[in-house]
Image (tube, helix red, strand yellow):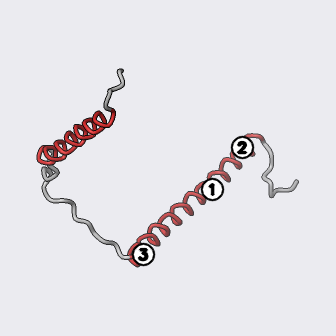
C-alpha cells in the first residue's frame, strides 16, 4: 500500500467514514431487530434472603435424607454380598467360631 502524501487528511477521512458507518448501523438496526416479538417479558420475582435460606435448607434436608438412604442401601448390599461370598466359599461367618 502506498503511503498517502497527507497522512492527517487520510486519518481524518478514514475515521469520519468509520464513524458514519457506525452511526448508520445504530440508526437502522434497532428497528430491524425487534425484541418484543415474544410478548411480555417473563415475570422477575425478587427473592428475599430469608426465603432463599429456607429453600436451601429444604433442599439440603432432602439431599441428606437421600444420601442416608443410599448409604444404608450400600451397607446392606455389601453385607449380603459378603455373606453370599462366604457361603459360596464355604467359609464360616466372621462372627462364628469353630
Mark 3 Cα within 10 Å, few/some/many (few <14, many 20+)? few
Looking at the picture, tell me which residue is in the foreground, 36 or 82: 36
Q: In what element is the residue under mark 3? A: helix
Q: Residue at point 47% right, 72% down?
A: 57
Asked which secondary structure carries label 1, the reply is: helix
Q: Secondary structure at mark 2?
A: helix
Residue in front for this viewpoint, 39 or 92: 39
In three-dimensional space, the C-alpha distance between marks 1 and 3, rounded to whole angstroms, equals 33 Å
> Reading the chain from its start, which is encountered first: label 2 or label 3?
3
Residue 19 location (% of width, % of height): 23, 43
Label 2 crowd (10 A; few <14 / some 14-19 / many >=20)? few
**Foreground of the two, 46 or 14:** 14
Q: Where residue 95 appears, x then y in whole percent?
A: 80, 58
Q: Is residue 42 left or right of residue 64?
A: left
Q: Above or below — where is 48 with respect to 23?
A: below
In-image side of 26 versus 72 (left or right) = left
Q: Residue at x 75, y 45 (%)?
A: 86
> Which residue carries the number 2 mark?
85
Which disc number belongs to residue 53?
Answer: none
User: Residue lying farthest top?
Assistant: 1
Sequence-wise, the earlier of marks 2 and 1 is 1
**Tag nearer the camera, 1 or 3:** 3
- Closer to the chain start, of discs 1 and 3, is 3
Q: Which mark is residue 54?
A: 3
Query: Which image quadrant is residue 39 in?
Result: bottom left
Crowd around label 1: few <14 · some 14–19 · many ≥20 (10 Å): few
Residue labelled with disc 1: 76
Amino acid at each position: 500500500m502506498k503511503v498517502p502524501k497527507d497522512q492527517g487528511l487520510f486519518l481524518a477521512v478514514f475515521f469520519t467514514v468509520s464513524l458514519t458507518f457506525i452511526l448508520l448501523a445504530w440508526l437502522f438496526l434497532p428497528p430491524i431487530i425487534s425484541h418484543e416479538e415474544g410478548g411480555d417479558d417473563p415475570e422477575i420475582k425478587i427473592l428475599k434472603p430469608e426465603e432463599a435460606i429456607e429453600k436451601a435448607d429444604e433442599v439440603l434436608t432432602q439431599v441428606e435424607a437421600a444420601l442416608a438412604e443410599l448409604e444404608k442401601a450400600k451397607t446392606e448390599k455389601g453385607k449380603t454380598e459378603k455373606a453370599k461370598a462366604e457361603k459360596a466359599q464355604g467359609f464360616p461367618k466372621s462372627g462364628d467360631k469353630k
